Every structure is written in C-alpha cells, then in structure tokens.
Amino acid sequence: MQDTHRPSDLRSNQQRNDVKNENEKISTKFISTDYNEDEFQNMLKLYEKTFNVIKENELVKGKIVAIHGEDVLIDIGSKSDGRVSINEFSNPEELVVGNEIEIFLEKIEDKEGQLVLSKKKADSIKMWDRIVDAQRDGTIVKGKCLRRIKGGFVVDLSGLTAFLPGSQIDTKPIRDYDEYVGKVMDFKVIKINNQIENIIVSHKVLIEESMAGQREELLKTIKKGMTLKATVKAITDFGVFVDLGGLDGLIHITDLSWGRINHPSDIVKLDQMIDVFVIEFDEEKQRVYLGLKQLQAHPWDNIQEKYKVGDKVSGKVVSLTDYGAFIEIEKGIEGLIHISEMSWTQHITSPSQMVTMGQLVDAQILNIDFDNRKLSLGMKQLTPNPWQSLLDKFPVGTKQKGKVCNITNFGIFVELEEGVDGLVHISDLSWTKKILDVNEFVKLGEIIEVVILGIDVANQRISLGHKQLFENPWDSLEAKYRTGLETVVKIVKPIEKGIIVELPDVVDSFIPASQLSVAPVRNFAELFRPGDSLNAKVIEFDKANKKIVLSVIEFFKDKDQETIDAYTSKFKLTRKFTVKDVQERSKTYESEQIDFRIEDIIGDEVQAPEPAVVIPEAPKTEKPEGK
C-alpha cells in the first residue's frame, strides 16, 4: 500500500510527539519498595545512558547490522533492532553492513513490540529540503522522466514527484515526446507550492543559461547584411524559424527562394544547418529577419543573356487570374500570358478554358520589361493566324451556315467553323420584329443561316446578319400602311410610353399611351394585356427609322358611341369618354415627341451595332492588337 505521508505531515507529527514525551516524563512516579526514590532515579539514569534518546516521527541515526533476504536490520540505539524492506533503498551502495544511515522512526513499538522504521520517508524529507534549497540557491537537481501526462511529464526526484511542462524541455520544438520517457536529466526547480507539495522543474532554463553568453555576444555583433550559420528549428506555413545560437530568427516564405514555392518544407528540413542572410535586425525588440534567397544571384540579373523577344520557352502554370496565366519558365522568372494572347479565334473569358494549374505549356516571348522585371508571353503566336485567311474563306456578302454557340441580350454568336465565330446583333435578326427575348427567336446549338456583313482582322471580329437573308419589306410596307389606314392590331407588350402592337404582316408598331384614351390611363400596362386585339389608325410611317405609329383616338373620330363604349368596356377603362370628347381632341400626336426605339423595349444596356469593317487585305504585322 502506498504511503501517503508528506514531509510537512511528518514534521507536524514529530512536534506533537515531543510534547507527548515531555508530558510522560513529568508524570513518571517511583513505585518500587526495594529502593528509595533517590537510589531508583540514579539507577534509572545509568540505564538510560546505555540507549539513545529517540522520538517517534523524526529522523534518527542508525546502523545497518544485518541484511536478511528482503529485510535490512537497523540499530538505532533502542532496545531492539528495526526492520526495513530492501526495496526502500533507492541507492544500492547504501546497503552495506556497518553503514550509518538516516532513518525515519514511525513508531517505537507496534502491536508486536517492534520498531517501525521507513527509509523511503527519510529520503523524502531530506529530498524536500534539498529541493527547497535548490530553488533558493539555483542549484541543479537530477531526475527521471517517468511518464507523459497532459501538458508535460511526471519526473521522479529521488522519491518526490515533480511536473516538467512540455514548454520547459528544450529551446527547440519537441518532435517526439516519447523519447524522453525514462530519460535521466538535469533540472532547475522553478516553482514550489508548499501547501500542496507541488514542484515544477525546467530543463530549458539550463539550456538558455548555457547559451546566454553566446546570445549576448551575437546581439552585440549582428548587423544587416551579415551571413550566419543557423539550424532549422520550426517550419510553418508562412516561413521558417531558425536558431542562430541562443537567438531565434525568421525566414519568411517569400525570402526562401526567388521562385514560387508551395510550402517552406520544399526548401529546408528540420534540424538542417543552413547559411542565412541578415535582412534586418530590430535591436530594440531583438528580432532578426533573415533570408535564404539573398545569398543567390537574382535570375533577372542575367536574363538578357538567356532570353530574347521571339524566343520559344516552356514553363509551368503557377497562377491563374481573371486576366491571364502566369508561367514560371525558371525559378524567379515568370511571364504573363494574357487571355487575349491564348487563342486567335476563341473568345477566352477565363484562362482556365485553355490551361490548368501546374500544366506545362509552350509560349513565345512577346516583350521583356527589364526595368520592372515583367515578361509578356503568348501562346497563339506558336500557331498560324487563321484570321489572315478569313477574308478569302468567308467573303463579305456571302451566305454561311453556323451553330449558335452563345446567346446574349444584345445578340447571338454563331460559330462558322471550329474556333471562328461572329456576332449577329439583335437589330440584324429581323426587319420587322422588335426582338424582346433572343431565346424565343433562336435556341442555343441551333444551326442557322447568316450573311457575312464584315470582317475586322485587326480586332478579330466578324459581323453577321440574319435579316439580310430576306428582302427589306419596308419598301412595300410604305404603300400598304399609309397614314390614315385603319387596321386591327394585336398587343405584343406594354412599355413605359405605350404599347407595342403587331400589324397583320407581323410588323411591330407602336401606340403611344396618349393615344389610348382622351384622358390619361395610368395603369394601361395592367389593362392592355399581350394577345388582346384592338382597332387603331396609322398616324405615322417612318421608313428610314423603320417606325409605324398608330392611334386609337384617331380611329374613333368618325365612329359611333356604341363602338367607343365597347372599347372602354373591353379594356375596363375607369374614365368613359364620348364621341364629342374624341372630336374635340385635336391631333395631339403632331406636337408629341414619339420616340419608338429598340432601347424602349430591351433596355439601355443594348448598344447599337458597330459598323461592319471590311478589310480587303490582311495586315502585315504578325501580332494583332488585343481585343
């Protein structure tokens, strides 16, 4: 059974025993009848001189008189010898007959009249005093790491247990804690709690003290620009910590290599000895900023000897951005391939359409900026420029077939051949229809016929048309839809200024809101729904702007009240009007600015189509300007 007595408990018991012995001494009385009291006391004194004065619960001197098996007999000057287990002797050299030792006396007599002694408790008391002295004097104590616990180790200090925090083992990060289990080490006592008998020790303090002189010398001599020896002690995602000999320094990840690296462990290993360059030394904070790449020549220093504009190079994709890909052609030398330099024909919106991270690619050097250390590269320059032959392949005015490869709110892109596509602007889709939704006119992947309107080789653009496949109907429409013509129209879509309606020949026209009623109709978008039909009169035909304007009010000027009431009832107009109201209404549209434009329907973001550029011969420059 483990003994739970602590050194402080033993001292308290010893003090109580002293008081008890004094009381017993006072209460001793003479009870013999053969001697008088004086004679008895003299004889008692002579007898007591043959024994040592011993007290329970205190340290006493003793001599090993015999060793029998697992028992050690010890004479402490009492009437009988005491027995102590041989297991209580931590030092085998003490187990010598005749050797004098200190032993703890627990009881003078137990139930069997035997002395009760403890070598283990004696060692604990002596060791505690040593520990207290060691903390006060700063002396070194030896101990053995017994086992790992949360946060550190349990250490045996000659019978006393102490705690060794993980942070107090070494100045370097510990990579394998298990290697310390069972290891005997030197320690310094850094904290003692007498109340709970708690001891905290440190091995790191001894290392720091041994390196203190070296650190002070280094702090005095270190300067910016020096080259020092260092040992890698820790590797993080952002850099490397090294030991300069009592002083730590940081090498940031950007100062490890002139080229890009994924992790500092790609360059250095733990415990590796390396040369480092002192970039900066903060004397006040005693911080050292170091570099590894500074000991090597910058790759750009002799780039003129290696590369020239027009050279073909190979490299690895190390970064992708919205505008291009960075290629590392060697450590410390990177070039940008802009998305406009990746393909002659494809519309590249992201570099990932052409390359991936880590991919090895070939490119041509387009420009070298020595001052700013920038390199411009191109991929498409390694292949023939197909735009040089497009004028011969797709003559302007010819009909071609292609697949719809992209649909936008301003038109459609049609692929004429692999990698070559052109734009059909929304205004070139139909002569007569105002296209509200391009997706309703054509579907993605559909094969349609188009006309080549123009080719801009310099800007790599092809303008296409779809309505040009048909004759312009506005010549014949002018005669059919003359001003004053009455007709039935179908509502296509209400807009802010009126409603778009469709004439019988599938021609879109416009009725201004002011021409729907003699009084303003505030919620006409809710009353006039797409698909409904109504009667109206043509009040304007503009062939140049392809615009036809109609009026409901002008239609009713020679109609009866029944016709007007049927109209107001059908469209649920809240304010009724009469034939007289219509006749009194002058031709307000003549003074009204009626601007029926495609922007009124599909939004201001739609831009007018650019004029087709026809270039009869290809430009002589090899490298066209970027889009």
Image: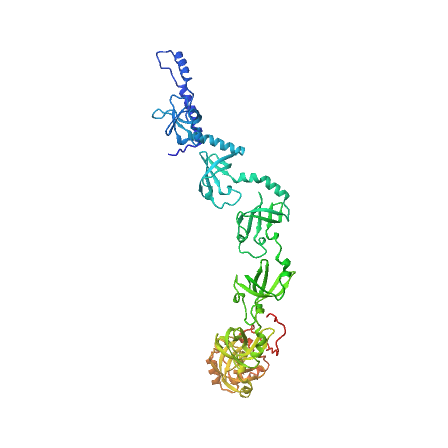
Residue 190 shows up from this direction: no
157 lies above or below 564: above
* Figure quadrant of residue 114: top left
Measured as percent of width and height from the top left, residue 345 is found at: 55, 72
Residue 341 shows up from this direction: yes
Picture residue at 49% right of the left edge, 33% below the top: 131
Outermost right residue? 371
Outermost front residue? 305
Render colour scheme: rainbow
Measured as percent of width and height from the top left, residue 103 is found at: 43, 27
Picture residue at 49% right of the left edge, 41% below the top: 165
Outermost left residue? 112
Task: Locate residue 540 relative to residue 5 in the image: left or right.
Answer: right
Measured as percent of width and height from the top left, residue 79 is found at: 38, 21
568 lies above or below 93: below
Task: Locate residue 526 relative to residue 619 in the image: left or right.
Answer: left
| Nearer to me, 165 or 18 | 165
| Nearer to me, 542 or 451 | 451
415 lies above or below 70: below
| Nearer to me, 81 or 7 | 81
Measured as percent of width and height from the top left, residue 598 is found at: 55, 77
Q: Quadrant of the C terminus?
A: bottom right
Picture residue at 59% right of the left edge, 83% below the top: 544
* Figure quadrant of residue 338: bottom right
> How many marks overall?
0
Q: Quadrant of the N terminus?
A: top left
| Nearer to me, 185 or 503 | 185
